Image (cartoon, rainbow, N blue to C red):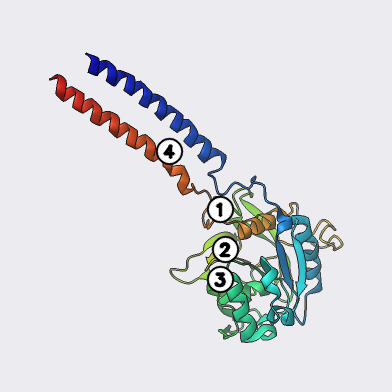
Amino acid sequence: MFRVMSFNIKNRVFGIFLLISMIINIQFVVGIGLTADNNQEIDFSEFNVALYKSSIPWEIDITAFSYLIPWIGCNLTLVESDDVKAGVLNNMDIIIFPGGNNIYWSDLGIEGRDIIRDFINNGGGYMGFCAGAFYACFSTVWYPFEGADPLPEDKDEFLDLFDGVGTGPIYEISEFPGSAMTQIDIENQEHMITHSLPESMTIYYEGGPYLEPNINADVTILGIFNEINKPAMLCFEYGNGKVFISGPHPEFEEDSDRDGLAPWVDMSDVESDWELLKQVVQWLVSPESNSSGIGIPLYSLVFPLALIVCFLIIRVKKQIIGNQTC
C-alpha cells in the first residue's frame, strides 16, 4: 500500500514536471525558435555594405542603391576594383554588384575574383542584380538580338558562385535595348526572405538573366519570371557566406523619388520592392544557416527529450510496481 501511495506521489510530481516542460518548450519554440521571424530586432547600423562601381557604371543604379542601403540602416561605401584588391572587403559584411555593363570580370580579373570568393567563403554576403547576377554564374548565355544564335561564355574570371547558367536578355519580356515592368511570382513563401511577401510582385526588368540551376545545385529559388516560367531570383550558401542574385531590378522605386530618381513617366509599380531587399540583407547577415524558412534550433529539443525520458521512467516504475504487487 505504501509503495502504491509513494508511486502516486511520484507520478504527480512527474506530471507537474511534464506540464512545466511542455510550457517552457512552447515558449522557446514560439518565442525565439522561429529562425525566419523577421520581427526579431537587428541593428543594421552594425553592418557595412560595399557597393561596387565599375569602370563603366550604370549611374542610376548606383544612385538607387545609394539611397536604399541607408534606408535599410546599413553603412554604405562605394568601392572600385583597386579598393577590392587593396583589402577594403576586410571591413565589409556585404558586397553588391548592381546592374550595368557586364564587365565586372574584366575590371577585377582573376585576382579580384579570388578576393571576392574568399570574402564570401569566410562569411560575407553577395548581392548581384542583372549584370551582377551574370557575374556570379558558372556560365552565361547571351542573345545579342532576338532570334540570334546564343553566345555562350564561361570565363575564368567569372565568380562561379552560382552552380548554374544565366541566360539573357529575355525577349519575351522586353526588346533589348529596352525595358519593362515584369511579374515575378514568389516561389517559396517559407523562406526568411520571402515569407511575408505577396504571391507576386511587379519588378523592373532590363536585359537581366533567368537563372537555371544545374542538376543537384543546392539553391533556393525565390521568384519566377511569370512570362517564361524560369527562375528570376534565388539564394544559396557559399562556404560560410551567402549569396542572393536577381535578374530583375527591385532596387528602383518607379512611382517615388525616394531612390534619388525622379518618378518614371513610362513605368508604374503599385508596390515598393524595398522591403524584399531589406529581408535579403537581413538573411545575409543572419547567423542562421537557413535555406528554407522556418527552423527550430537544437536547444529547443531538450524539452521534448525530457518529456520522453520522464514518460519512459513512469512506465518503467509502473511496470515494476505492478510486478511486485502480483
Label 3: which secondary element? helix
Hey, what amino acid is under mark 4? Answer: Phe
Question: Mark number for residue 23?
Answer: none
| Mark 4 or mark 3, whichever is nearer to me | 4
Cα separation, mark 4 vs mark 3, equals: 35 Å
Left or right? Give the position of 94 relative to 235.
right
* Nearer to us in this view, 194 or 285: 285
Using the numbered discs, state the Cα–Cα distance from disc 2 to disc 1 in whole angstroms.
10 Å
Element at badge 4? helix
Label 1 near label 2: C-beta < 8 Å? yes
Kindly identify the residue that appears in the image at 83 percent across and 56 percent down: 256
Is residue 141 visible from the viewing direction of this image?
Answer: yes
Amino acid type at mark 2 = Cys
- In the picture, residue 233 is in which quadrant? bottom right
Mark 3–mark 1 distance (CA, rounded to whole Å): 22 Å
The kind of residue on which mark 3 rests is Asn
Q: Nearer the viewer, residue 206 or 257?
A: 257
Question: Upstream in the sequence, badge 3 or badge 1?
Answer: 3
Which is more N-terminal, label 3 or label 4? 3
Viewer-nearest of discs 4 and 1: 4
Residue under the image location 51 percent in, 64 percent down: 219
Q: Secondary structure at mark 2?
A: strand
Nearer-the-camera pick, 227 or 213? 213
| Residue that carries the numbered disc 2 in the rendered image | 235
Q: Which residue is mark 4?
A: 303
Amino acid type, label 1: His
Circle on res. 191: 1
State whether residue 163 is above or below residue 75: below
Q: Is residue 143 left or right of residue 77?
A: left
* Of pointers 4 and 2, the one earlier in the residue sequence: 2
Element type where label 1 sits in the image: loop
Give percent across and percent down for residue 217. 47, 68
